[in-house]
Amino acid sequence: MNDNSSEATPGPERTTPGAAAAPGRIVLLTTSHRVAPGLLSWPAWQALHAADQVLCADGAHPQLPYLREAGITVGEESPTAQELVDACAGGRTVVVVATGEGESALTDGLARLAGTGRLSMPELELLPASYDLPGARLLDLVQVMDRIRAECPWSSQQTHKGLAKYGIEEAYELVEAIEEGDRDELREELGDVLLQVVFHARIAEEDLDAPFSIDDVAGGIVAKLIHRHPHVFGDATATTPEEVKEHWLRTKAVEKQRSSITEGIPLGQPGLALAAKLASRARTAGLDIPLPPVEGIGYDLLALAVRAEAEGVDPEAALRAAARAYRDAIRETEG
């Protein structure tokens, strides 16, 4: 069969006017040091594999071994803003893996170049490759506490007993912030209480006989919460706060196997709080315990604390509120 047709010979590639000067694209890839290296989002992996060039100024960046293992060539370079713009010429895409300190000098330089109006700037995209999960900053606190314990002359010498008084102080300051309704103070005091927990857990790691860590502390309270909330994590049902309390007390009784309802009540707490706690335990257990038939201010206060608890009033909080009112009256008189 005679075919006069023939394949067309490829001619010079047509280019769109100005294509050679296409500004290209810069992708600033950020990662969280609180997420294990290599655990990047799918858009991040796509951008890395599609890039014409990948750069990172930190040769010790924890992500680099994982990127290279995935077949990505990473140049250990710290280009200036102008050099980066030039690298994007012709429509090229350059991914910059941000260092732990960020790339403020680079982004500031790009902003200055854009401000001149003399350059056709590449498209700049900020691409978070990994995100902090809720609670991720707690890892920072653990790391900071590790370093303080190792390097601070004061912190390295502290013991559980030595820190006990600070735990009490911080708890009182937290209660005061709650009662005052100061949100900023509340956030700060919660942090101070959290510090006590992390500090004690860090000290506990060094115990030769029975060490435990902050992970053991967290694991213990997680297991306790799950076990005492069968209506959330199990098949039990609770539709009212009273039913929830019944579940809590029932599971707690099985866990503790106590011989008396008074076990576990700290006797070192303030007197009014102690009296109210004893009354609460007795009432919950269905025990009708008459008050000691003894006269005196202490027994009068005991009777008031029991009465307050029965009426759903925290006697400690009520007394503090009255004391603050008394303080204000004193100041007004002084003024």
Image: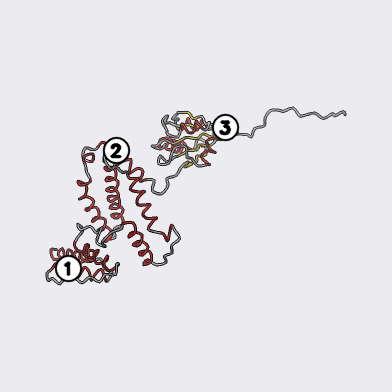
Residue 302 occupies quadrant: bottom left
- Label whose residue precedes the other's in the sequence (1 or 3): 3
Of tags 3 and 2, the one toward the viewer is 2
x and y percent of residue 335 in the render? 14, 63
x and y percent of residue 289 in the render? 22, 70
Tell me the element at label 3. loop
Q: Which mark is residue 90?
A: 3
Residue linked to disc 2: 147
Verify CB contact (< 8 Å) between mark 1 and mark 3. Answer: no
- The span from disc 2 to disc 1 (Cα, nearest Å) is 48 Å
The foreground one among 281 and 12 is 281
Q: Is residue 59 above or below residue 130?
A: above
- The span from disc 3 to disc 2 (Cα, nearest Å) is 48 Å
Residue linked to disc 1: 301
- Label whose residue precedes the other's in the sequence (2 or 1): 2
Binning the other alpha carbons within 10 Å of mark 3 as few (below 14), some (14 to 19) or many (20 upward) gives some
The foreground one among 90 and 30 is 30
Extreme residue toward the right, this view:
1
Question: What amino acid type should be assigned to the residue bearing mark 1?
Answer: Leu
Binning the other alpha carbons within 10 Å of mark 1 as few (below 14), some (14 to 19) or many (20 upward) gives some
The foreground one among 28 and 272 is 272
- Label whose residue precedes the other's in the sequence (3 or 2): 3
Verify CB contact (< 8 Å) between mark 2 and mark 1. Answer: no
- Identify the residue shown where x is 42% and y is 34%: 62
**Quarter occupied by the N terminus:** top right
x and y percent of residue 106 in the render? 43, 35
